[in-house]
Image (cartoon, rainbow, N blue to C red):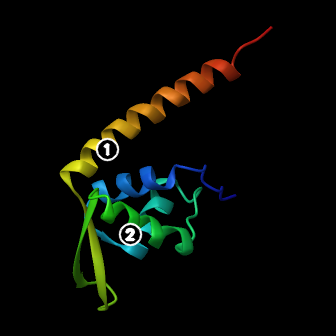
């Protein structure tokens, strides 16, 4: 059953998806779904504002191209700043997961 993403994790998921290669908006959504084995579904209404925000912050860049459906689409790539941010956010996420695992595994 698909899960909702945790607040604050969409940007990290987008940066990771785009780090795997250039992708248009809907392709980013599909890539996240694929990376999670179909367990995470992203709403288009959340994706496109996030892509705009990340581009405005200089973490991703876009260029117009033609999609596999032969339609004009913006393709997103990771910038140097985006690569740095992805690395930092991955470290923070992994630290949080380790701390949560330890805390939730505690026994009386």
The 10 Å Cα crowd at callout 1, few under 14, some 14 to 19, many 20 or more, is some
Residue 57: percent from left, percent from top: 32, 58
Q: Residue furthest top?
A: 108
Task: Give residue 22's position: percent from left, percent from top.
Answer: 25, 66
Left or right: 28, with 59 as reference point: right
Task: Identify the mark nearer the N-term, 2 or 1.
Answer: 2
Q: Secondary structure at mark 1?
A: helix
Can I make out residue 35 in this image? yes
Left or right, 24 with respect to 6, comes to left
Say few, some or many: other residues with alpha carbon within 10 Å of mark 2 (under 14 / 14 to 19 / 20 or more): some
The answer to whether 62 is drawn above or below residue 100 in the figure is below
Q: Quadrant of the N terminus?
A: bottom right
Q: CA distance from mark 2 to mark 1?
A: 16 Å
Where residue 30 appears, as percent x and y from the top left, is: 46, 68
- Coordinates of residue 4 in the picture (x, y in percent): 65, 56
**Quadrant of the snapshot with the C terminus:** top right
Position of 48 relative to 11 (above/below): below
Q: Horizontal placement of 25 versus 68: left or right?
A: right
Quadrant of res 101: top right
Q: Which residue is mark 2?
A: 52
Q: Residue at x 46, y 60 (%)?
A: 32
Question: Which residue does the image show at 31% across and 44% down from the upper left?
Answer: 85
Q: Which residue position is annotated with label 1?
A: 85
Residue 19, numbered circle: none
The answer to whether residue 20 is visible is no
The quarter holding residue 35 reads bottom left
- Residue at image position (59%, 50%) is 7
Q: Residue at x 22, y 83 (%)?
A: 65
Of residue 103 and residue 27, the one placed in the foreground of this image is 103
Task: Say what secondary structure mark 2 lies in.
Answer: helix
């Amino acid at each position: 059953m698909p899960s909702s993403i945790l607040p604050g994790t969409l940007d990290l998921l987008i940066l990771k998806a785009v780090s795997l290669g250039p992708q248009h908006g809907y392709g980013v959504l599909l890539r996240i779904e694929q990376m999670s084995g179909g367990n995470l579904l992203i709403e288009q209404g959340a994706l496109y504002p996030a892509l705009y925000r990340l581009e405005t912050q200089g973490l991703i860049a876009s260029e117009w191209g033609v999609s596999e459906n032969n339609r004009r689409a913006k393709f997103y790539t990771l910038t140097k700043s985006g690569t740095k941010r992805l690395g930092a956010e991955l470290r923070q996420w992994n630290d949080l997961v380790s701390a949560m695992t330890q805390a939730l595994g505690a026994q009386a």
